[in-house]
Amino acid sequence: MPAPSNTLFRQFKRVSESIAFYPALITAFYAFLAAAMLAFESTSMATSLRAHLPAGLTDPDNGREILGTLITSIVSLTVFSFSMVMVVLNGAAARLTPRVLPGLISDMRNRVILGIYLGSTLYYLLLISTINKNEPANVPSTGLLLALVMGILSLAMFVVFIRSVSQSIQVDWVLSQLYRGAYANLEKRKQRVARIDSVPDSGQWWCLSASRPGYLRAVNERRLGKLLHKRGLLAVIQVEPGFFLVEGHPLIRFSEPLSDEDRAAATDCFDFHSNEFASANVSYGMRQIAEIAVKAISPAINDPGTAMRAINLISVLLQRIGGVPPFDVGCLEQGRPRLFYPQLPMQRLLETVIAPIRVYASHDPLVIITLLQCMKNALHDSPSDDQIEAIHSEIHALRDQADSDVKSWRDRQAVNDAIDRLMKLEGRKHPQVKRLPVERNRPD
């Protein structure tokens, strides 16, 4: 039977990323506020305050008309806002990549604004249901004043929403969001592994296999950490986040065998899901940026400028990865980790991120040159020997791709200029790559 904490962990992960999560919380707050205002109206303070309010707020007919107008207006804004969100999501899927949709859906600003709209509407409905024109003394005047303030706030939120939506359809903004999320995740990972030399050798450790298929999304470290601490164990996860597991695939190795009860508890700590958020793993962000670049290169979009901007952002992330070991840690106990996560090594990261762009952009010398510059930037920091070897392999692949697909002598010369800049790197960073042969055949 799944532990309640693990069930809550998985449900919270899913619900908190839903477009309805914050609107539901905000609507519940507005319902509580309406109840509190109605209770306040029966106090002596509200009676004394009513004498200082405008006459229009103490008249039942006026109050119902004000609330009716607000309800109609906010419902119209809500319908328009939801329609705009759907248009943005549809456009993002068509022009960018479907992988960015979870991030756009979970955008905090849009969810808060929609929550304010829905909550305000509920507040107005609860208030209007209490107005009786035969009892003018019981009109919730203070509540009506607050309703007008909410209406003004909703108008201000509509302006913010229009600005948010206009940003969401800009590819530069989407790229910047992905980059910032991936960069922040990478910096946190670098801090966690700063004092860790290597992952323990788990080749002979006891292995727990996956009990169901799915993409490895997250681990309930709080629950798993208690199990590891209680048994005095270390554990190494066998696949990187986002890996698709089938039933029976090695999932995690423990330094000592687990009992049946502990095995069930450990299996229950894993969450499988298909959404990818750039802030959850740097490889997710880089992959989504690469997919936007590939989409921009396609004949349907034909926007190499966007592809080159995406490559430049990837180059910064690759440079920052230089020298970072391909693993992460968790379940910290007095600064010492009990859980180790594998991460994509540089070679596989380049295969996932750079190779698709290289293949699809092989006909475009500008993109090829930008990719070569990206590899040069990746070598600027302090990459390890394995990372340098992987980057050199990609440089040779770029050179061979250009040699095969770039035909114009002028374009080949431009690629050679980029190769010459790479050849200026010294020491172990020197790629030892040959220039493209150039045959300048022009009519006399």
Image (spheres, rainbow, N blue to C red):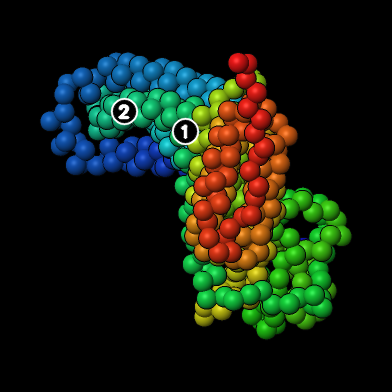
Disc 1 and disc 2: Cα gap in Å? 25 Å
Q: Residue furthest right?
A: 248
Q: Where's residue 168, x and y in %?
A: 47, 30
> Residue furthest toward the bottom?
232
Between circles 1 and 2, the one closer to the viewer is 1
Q: Earlier in the sequence, mark 1 or mark 2?
A: 2
> Could you tell me residue 333's position as x and y percent?
55, 78
Say what amino acid the circle numbered 2 marks: Ala
The residue positioned 32% from the left and 38% from the top of the image is: 37
Helix, strand or loop at disc 1?
Answer: helix
Vertical placement of 399 versus 85: above or below? below
Q: Which mark is residue 156?
A: 2
| Left or right relative to 106: residue 156 | left
Task: Indicate the position of residue 162 as horizontal and vertical percent values.
Answer: 40, 25
- Quarter holding the C terminus is top right
Q: Are marks 1 and 2 in contact (CB under 8 Å)?
A: no
The residue closer to the viewer here, 407 or 95, is: 407
Q: Which mark, residue 102?
A: none
Q: Quadrant of residue 112?
A: top left
Using the rendered image of the protein, determine whether residue 19 is visible from the camera's viewpoint.
no
- Give the residue type that dot 1 points to: Asp
| Mark 2 crowdedness (10 Å alpha carbons): few <14, some 14-19, many ≥20 | few
Which residue is painted at 47% across and 33% down in the image?
172
Label 1 sits on residue? 172
Is residue 91 among the parts visible in the rendering?
A: yes
Q: Residue 34 is drawn in which quadrant?
A: top left
Residue 5 drawn at (x, y percent): 63, 63
Please identify the residue farthest to the left as the structure is shown: 52
